[in-house]
Image (tube, rainbow, N blue to C red):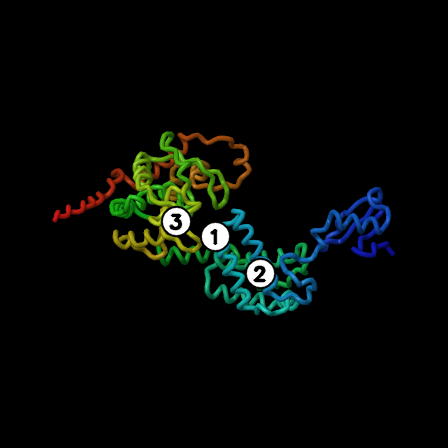
Amino acid sequence: MPEHTPKHKLTRHSRGWVKKINRKTKWVCSFKVAETAAEADDYYERHFSRLWKDREELPGKTNLDDLRLSDIANGFIARKKSALDAGEITQRTYDEYCECVQAFLDSVGATRPVRGVIDDTMAFGRFRRECAAKFGPHRLAKFVIIIRSLFKWASAPPLRLPAPAYGSEFDLPSRATFRHHRRAKRAEHGPLIFTADEVKKLTKKASPTMRAMILLGLVGYGNTDLATLPASVVNLDTMVIDYARNKTGADRRVPLWPEHADAIAKVIALKRPAQPGRAGLLFRTRFGLAYVRGRKDQIGMQFSVLCKSAGVVQNGRNFYSLRRTFRTHADTAGDQRAAALIMGHDVGDVGGLYVQNITDERLRAVCDRVKKAVFPDGIPAARKEPKKKEPKPTKKS
């Protein structure tokens, strides 16, 4: 029989002490560090306290049999809130975590004991079917991943819950499902890009701010990209924006057209107020806020109004379709790596690790190819803003 320490059940090994942590045998220390069982327990407490101390996220819940599903859900969301405060995730991502976890609690039962949920394969399958009835495969996959992340977090220290019995009905959607969904959407809505005539109508009717956003959308910028773009990274001298993409952290370098510089200069000239923490943003609302805040996307809403005004409405098409328009025409330039760098994408092959530099000439060639495709007759001039009426002088009494 192997020898175990009395307090923390460390096991005597041939060269020292080990312990099974989270179902895996981990090395603790050698006999030179702790010769006796009592010394081994003491060493474990001093150096591995984060694994055995009381659960800080769940005060009063030291017995796993007392845990309810809402307890681990609250602990998980608390960790995500810490990640949000540290800038590791965005407000939108945090809101998605909250929405998904709340939907799971509503489906399975917030007050159910965790032990019972872990072994309830039918509960996971039922929740997935409910999501599949409401969402497409992309959002369904996101919800499945979030719930798996919840229980993965709970299976690690300090909780160390057993892995749930998900069953085969809680799998991610297959690649075939994604392909069928994409094909059905294309058949229903058609290509989700804008024609040259539609882009012309949009740029002619757009406000100065929306015009700048549209022109940047046509070189690969999406809604959140623009809402989080610092003014300091827009270099109008070199006509380049060199700034990693917030969503993925991937490198991104975007050459600008002369029309970009004119439009951005007009946005800067607006001198809009800034709420705390928003002063560095290039685009701010008239109240000094970011254009995208959680699920509230004012870029998308204002662009939708502009599309209706310009008569270019099509179901399934939105501001992000400008990014699709760019990538569709950029592909004809035949320089995938340059297009990916402008988009903030990772090509994903081994060769990308060896490419140390992509010249601005290659990047400009791609953007100029897109400009020629979407503005064959040149970019139309910005609309003339109505002159502000000066107040009439008051008559002296």
Q: Which residue is mark 1?
A: 91
Q: What amino acid is at disc 1?
A: Gln
Q: Which residue is mark 3?
A: 289
Which mark lies nearer to you, 1 or 3? 3
Q: Which residue is mark 2?
A: 74
Q: With respect to residue 198, does 379 lie above or below?
A: above
Q: What amino acid is at disc 2?
A: Asn
Residue 375's x, y, as percent?
28, 40
Residue 24's x, y, as percent?
73, 52
Which SS class for mark 1?
Answer: helix
Could you give the CA–CA distance between mark 3 and mark 2, rounded to whole angstroms? 29 Å
Most distant residue in the right direction: 1
Which SS class for mark 2?
Answer: helix
Mark before the other along the chain sequence, 1 or 3: 1
- Left or right: 132 as drawn, with respect to 17: left
- Residue 22 picture quarter: bottom right
Nearer to the camera, 62 or 172: 62
Which mark lies nearer to you, 3 or 2? 3
For disc 3, the neighbor class at 10 Å (few under 14, some 14 to 19, many from 20) is many
Q: With respect to residue 73, does 243 lie above or below?
A: above
Q: Where the N terminus falls, by quadrant? A: bottom right
Residue 304's x, y, as percent?
32, 54
Q: Are marks 1 and 2 in contact (CB under 8 Å)?
A: no
Mark before the other along the chain sequence, 3 or 2: 2
